[in-house]
Amino acid sequence: MAPSATTLKGQPLDKVLLEAMLKRRLFYTPSFEIYGGVAGLYDYGPPGCALQANIIDQWRKHFILEEDMLEVDCTVLTPHEVLKTSGHVDKFADWMCKDPKNGEIMRADHFVEAVLEARLRGDKEARGQAIVEKEADPKKKKKKAKSEAVKLDDAVVTEYEEVLAKIDNYDGPELGQLIKKYELKNPETGVLPSDPVAFNLMFQTSIGPSSNLAGYLRPETAQGQFLNFAKLLEFNQSGMPFASASIGKSYRNEISPRAGLLRVREFLMAEIEHFVDPEGGKKHPRFTEVEDIELVLLDRDTQLSGKTATKSIKIGEAVKTKLVDNETLGYFIARIHLFMIKIGVDVSKMRFRQHMANEMAHYAADCWDCELLTSSGWVECVGCADRSAYDLSVHAKKTGAPLLVRQQREVPLVIEEWQIDVEKKKFGPLFKKDARTVEGALEATTQEQREKLAKELSDNGKITLDVAGVGNGQVEITKDSIKIEFRKRTENVREFTPNVIEPSFGIGRTLYALLEHNFWTRASDGGDEARGVLSFPPIVAPTKVLIVPLSSNVQFKPNLKKLSQRLRSLGISSRVDDSSASIGKRYSRNDELGTPFGITVDFQTLQDQTLTLRDRDSTRQVRAEEDKIVDAIKSLADGSKTWADIEAELPKFEGQEIEVAER
Amino acid sequence: MAPSATTLKGQPLDKVLLEAMLKRRLFYTPSFEIYGGVAGLYDYGPPGCALQANIIDQWRKHFILEEDMLEVDCTVLTPHEVLKTSGHVDKFADWMCKDPKNGEIMRADHFVEAVLEARLRGDKEARGQAIVEKEADPKKKKKKAKSEAVKLDDAVVTEYEEVLAKIDNYDGPELGQLIKKYELKNPETGVLPSDPVAFNLMFQTSIGPSSNLAGYLRPETAQGQFLNFAKLLEFNQSGMPFASASIGKSYRNEISPRAGLLRVREFLMAEIEHFVDPEGGKKHPRFTEVEDIELVLLDRDTQLSGKTATKSIKIGEAVKTKLVDNETLGYFIARIHLFMIKIGVDVSKMRFRQHMANEMAHYAADCWDCELLTSSGWVECVGCADRSAYDLSVHAKKTGAPLLVRQQREVPLVIEEWQIDVEKKKFGPLFKKDARTVEGALEATTQEQREKLAKELSDNGKITLDVAGVGNGQVEITKDSIKIEFRKRTENVREFTPNVIEPSFGIGRTLYALLEHNFWTRASDGGDEARGVLSFPPIVAPTKVLIVPLSSNVQFKPNLKKLSQRLRSLGISSRVDDSSASIGKRYSRNDELGTPFGITVDFQTLQDQTLTLRDRDSTRQVRAEEDKIVDAIKSLADGSKTWADIEAELPKFEGQEIEVAER
């Protein structure tokens, strides 16, 4: 059963009300709307843009500055060859099919799922059973197909249910077979869709005037970081482990974008690539700082058993029991958890879900998604994957660039092994032009082979070796031209390709979840249902302070200007609303914009420099001189004090019930 | 004559030295370098990325927060129709020609210019004259064609010089004619290039799976702001004037990108669209705050006379004399000037150049570029244009969206004019199905026609009117069915399309100029030539403080950690360098990274909590307790104190000449 979405105060979330408010306050809006819009493209208006900038600012502080990560800004335009090597050209695709009658293009897996689910609903209806909806999964958001009350055989029901359980496992041809086997017709037109074809999700373009350099808009910010690995390692003075990070737009040409900000074609990502030595269990030096943090986990085994029950567990315990693969992965999961709470995510609507084996890329060691509960179900907002050495290895192999770490060994490594020495003077004349080939064949022998060859040489005074392309394919080498000995070799330098732990944030999805998690209406306080509030924490609120003069009297102007300049110099954003609307209406508007604090300037201010400070969430007010009010705002904004602290310090203001009086 | 580029200390700029340093310190690097790179694409490494983020942060404070601008974040992907309407699909192109022999693709204007200049150089050589190079113009950066010492006729020299002076005025066919007329062969191959063809500079792609929605990567951030105008006006509670602003990537598929960061295919822009009432002279309410600021201007008339002499003039004076078209344009030019100084641009290497009539778009009223002097000559870093009502008008016309302002008139407008009233009861039966057509023809009459018709009606009791498509094309209307009178009409609402003043910043170019303007070497102080310094102002420096422990002794660790946490909580970025390099080498590295302050932690620190603070520019040091050192850094970083202030307050430290001693 899908848990239903609620407001911050636990009331059922009225999504229509919320969306109307977000539109009215211009948090975001469909791009090119006056031209009819383009699916999957949204613009952020002023409050959305400020909210996004504040989330990014906190992200930079929480991750990049806190851990001295190396931030880079790489290009979006990426040449074909890079994404061919990374595997995106071949594999970054969805299967799509087309309705031959109306030309509709559909994701094949979504189509099969929708039609089978409709049949099962129809069956239940025919049997007179209650219809229990599957948990909504926004990754597969789809139009619900119409159902008809038709009873199915019990065996057919079981078969459909098995197909649905494995829906993520089918490739295109298999989906095509299912469509034919079950005669899955598009309910809109009554015809079978075409065979599924792969549709690559990357936007393609051509770089330069000659049209022969194919390129794509990057589907993730990771590749630029991998390609710069050697330079970053050098910049870091060869210190390991280290992390790079990047904040920027990425692009995916979704077949059918839906669900507002949750599946879009152009989106902001913030990605970390933490490079770690694969040996020694991927320890993290600061893991002890987070090990006692309790997380809500939904592990792989639980999901495989068809359940969604989560468990609360300390991350230290999760790593110790190998539920989470290693310390570094665990460290970042905990850091993501802390970040989400800091920016105002409702902790009761957050979980970490482990990828099932078939969901992960073949090279990944482990992967956990931070999912947030919204009205579209649980939404993946952050992925945290151990990508192993895959990316660095494929790019190194393709280009020959040394994307690896060379470390002086503290204790030189001593290896005892069979070694072959060639007596060049004898060997050369013996094999002439084939000398190199024969030497290569010798070098290619394994330790086991060498042991045998050594015995052969000492027993017979010569060895016989298979060398393709030389003579009849076999050569004889006598003991005066080679030596095979078991002896020690010392290695002072160790070379390895680092593994990568990648926390990857979808900023737009996180921002949308934040809107839902912080939304409530004054109805919860017995107030007006239509009066929405967004209770963002001050650090991410688009504007921190609303300044409202009691009237638009020019006498107030100097005070307003001085006050906003003073706040600005403290790095606190404010906005003056000197419109002619009532104070109540002006506060109402700013509750919807999520402005946490309000200052009223009135005629008394002109006499004694006192101001009224209003708290958005409680609507309670205090009054004091400007200095004290500014200090209060400063500590509220940086989180060092709560509103309760301020109420304990400064005199309450109950002069007039502006809120009620003016409405 | 090209003014030659100098370091911050006035020495000639050694560009090779600077570029080697920028590469070594990873300010920026060619993208995809391990794959051979792609022309015109660069990645920013950690210091470049931080410098860019700090410039943007200051930009946001200086423009957006200071003036309550409405920041928006619009998509890069833009459908064809939008850019067709804006004129970019038809006009955003350069002329290119191709060498049929080696396939080289060249910008046609660059090619003609290069070959003619080579011939003039050859002529001078043949005449034994000194060769004076034209002022370098990075917008037309080109390979210099090889010259041969061949004397030309005097008339030919004059002709070539005239062509070169007008090179920006030729279109593609004209450039093609020049190539044929003067037989301009590619010096590389000895053949004539092909006829120039227009090459649109926008990157094209296809949006969605069906490939039928053509789109482009935006060439500027402006269009998204225009399309959202009506929503932004409403968000601003209909207040005028107001500005929107946007910071984001834009794309231009340059034919032959060169000159490092100065002409790239993907770049960060910061653009403001200030919407202003076209009536009343485009006044700006805060113009008095800037009117006394003195600017260096290179006006249109001076350039037309073939000169580059600038004049220093107060912006108030420039607007008063109409040198700068209006107050709002002047206000932003002055604000750009202040911003550039704030981030560390050398004011002696900055000028504002007015566009000549043929450089501006046909709709622009006036346009000034902020140009910065670099080793590639004067570089346009900011454009500041009055775009008139062009953009809003074309989008409104195309879509029917009301991109205009409706204002209640303070004093209603009274218009006295000829008006026509139709007596419906008589008029309808008279014309039956043609009644609407006839009425439309009446409404379409001009004031002059109405005056005549009124006379006709009163003289003859009827009028004769041409109405295409009704009867024989003429109708008679009698005085019982219409009335034509000269009388008053009152208009209470005024509708107008705002004009747009657009300051548009190229962040990458500005960043590159900043690097050159702040670069010098210790040779200026009698030190080492190879020791570069980047003297960024603290507010934009990538890292503010370097913390160096005297040795990597573990005893220092707790102090280092505490110190960086303390600085971080003040919003001051720091970096610990506990590598084994000498202190001198560690400071040297950070001089190259532009880190303004250094703190040394030594064994005395462990005893008395005192620290040494070093100033990057003078390399002088003071020593005091941690609290005082942190306070000093805070005031240095926010600009409230200078190093001289700090030296006056805190005891000088001359314990050891670490710099010299350790090298």
Image (tube, coloured by chain):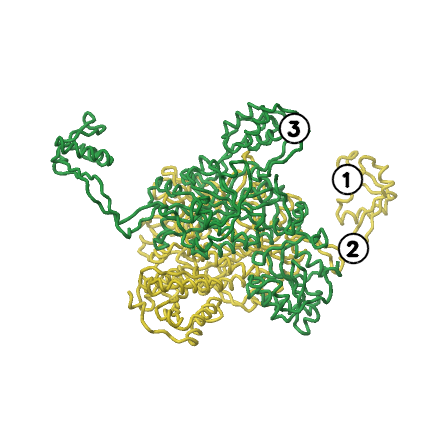
Chain colours: A green, B yellow
**Whole-percent x and y of residue B457?**
84, 45
Labels 2 & 3 near each other (Cβ < 8 A): no
**Whole-percent x and y of residue A293?**
50, 52
In the image, residue A437 sits, relative to residue A413, either above or below, namely above
Labels 3 & 1 near each other (Cβ < 8 A): no
Please give the residue where the numbered disc 3 appears in the rendered image: A122
Q: Badge 1 local density, few (<14 within 10 Å), some, or many (20+)?
A: some
Please give the residue where the numbered disc 2 appears in the rendered image: B490
Residue B162 vs residue A374: left or right? left
> What type is the residue that disc 2 sits on?
Thr
The kind of secondary structure element at disc 1 is: strand
**Residue B578 shows which numbered tag?**
none
Is residue B491 visible in the rendered image? The answer is yes
Question: Which circle, 2 or 3, is nearer the viewer?
Answer: 3
The kind of secondary structure element at disc 2 is: strand
Q: CA distance from mark 1 to mark 2?
A: 30 Å
Do badges 1 and 2 share one subunit? Answer: yes
Residue at left 23%, top 47%?
Answer: A490
The kind of secondary structure element at disc 3 is: helix
Q: CA distance from mark 2 to mark 3?
A: 66 Å
First in sequence, mark 1 or 2: give its number. 1
Residue B662 vs residue A295: left or right? left
Q: CA distance from mark 3 to mark 1?
A: 68 Å
Please give the residue where the numbered disc 1 appears in the rendered image: B466
**Whole-percent x and y of residue A177?**
52, 25
> What type is the residue that disc 1 sits on?
Asp
Is residue B156 visible in the rendered image? The answer is no
Nearer to us in this view, A613 or B151: A613
Nearer to us in this view, A480 or A72: A480
